[in-house]
Image: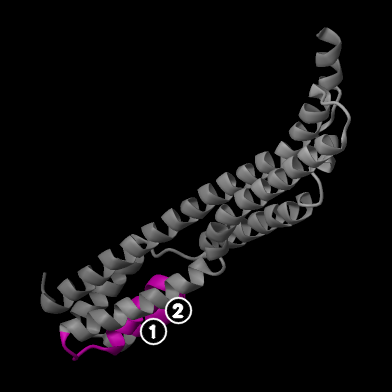
């Protein structure tokens, strides 16, 4: 028993990956895709400028004084998602409040599309990777039983040896799927927080238009 444990401990991670079979290639490509998409979206979201309280103090002051053009110029000077949404509201001043809000909301959706980018594929990979792993295991099990049918006798080593190798694809596929699922929802949470902030700013903008002296 001790010798068997020592032999098992000598199997390297790379050896296990190689024994997983040809389906490890697409699984490896999926893992690279997950890493690329996550860091691409993460750094894009992180790079986007967020407006601070000083901007809104100045912007609100300009609107209270009726300096719409100056407020619009201020939005253009920072050029970020929040400022573009606020600018859209300024461009629709004079229209019904409902129409103004709808235009700002539409601009917000356009900004969300920019933030999400190809983030959708993380969710797709979260579903595909485990299934690819299961396919690799099923194919391996079929081969095992086929070899058993050709063998004169059945040995535990013949079954267990091939089975543990074929379970590698399932383990790798599930790991990639879980990680992809977690990263997708993490990024989605970041985007949702931004959207909530934009909604808050839109409501405050509408309040300011309705009550310019408060």
Residue range in magenta is 72-96
Alpha carbon separation for disc pair 1 and 2: 6 Å
Horizontal arrangement in the rendering, residue 5 relative to residue 40 (left or right): right
Q: Residue at x 80, y 34 (%)?
A: 162
Quarter occupied by residue 152: top right
Residue positioned most to the bottom: 94
Residue nearer the viewer, 208 or 116: 116
* 97 relative position to 38: left or right: left
Residue lying at the far right of the rendered structure:
152
Check if mark 1's residue and mark 2's residue have beta carbons within 8 Å. Answer: yes
Where 53 sits versus 160, above or below?
A: below
**The N terminus: image quadrant:** top right
Residue at the (49%, 68%) spot, across then down:
115
Q: Is residue 78 magenta?
A: yes
Seen from the viewer's position, the closer of residues 191 and 201 is 191
Please state the horizontal and vertical placement of residue 47, each as a whole percent of the image. 54, 63
- Percent across and percent down for residue 184 are 51, 54
For mark 2, what is the residue? 77
The C terminus sits in image quarter: bottom left
Compared to 143, does 212 lie above or below? below
């Amino acid at each position: 028993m001790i010798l068997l444990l020592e032999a098992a401990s000598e199997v390297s991670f790379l050896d296990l990956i190689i024994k997983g079979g040809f389906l490890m290639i697409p699984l490896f490509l999926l893992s690279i895709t997950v890493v690329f998409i996550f860091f691409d979206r993460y750094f894009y979201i992180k790079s986007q400028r967020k407006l601070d309280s000083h901007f809104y103090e100045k912007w609100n002051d300009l609107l209270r004084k009726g300096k719409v053009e100056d407020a619009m110029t201020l939005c253009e000077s920072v050029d970020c998602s929040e400022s573009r949404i606020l600018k859209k509201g300024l461009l629709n001043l004079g229209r019904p409040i409902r129409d103004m809000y709808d235009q700002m909301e539409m601009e917000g959706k356009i900004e969300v599309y920019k933030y999400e980018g190809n983030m959708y594929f993380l969710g797709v990979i979260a579903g595909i990777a485990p299934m690819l792993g299961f396919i690799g295991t099923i194919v391996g099990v079929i081969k095992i039983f086929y070899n058993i049918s050709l063998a004169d006798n059945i040995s535990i080593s013949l079954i267990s040896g091939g089975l543990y190798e074929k379970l590698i694809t399932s383990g790798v596929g599930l790991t990639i799927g879980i990680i992809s699922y977690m990263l997708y929802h993490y990024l989605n949470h970041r985007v949702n927080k931004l959207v909530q902030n934009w909604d808050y700013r839109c409501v405050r903008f509408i309040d300011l238009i309705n009550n310019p002296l408060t």
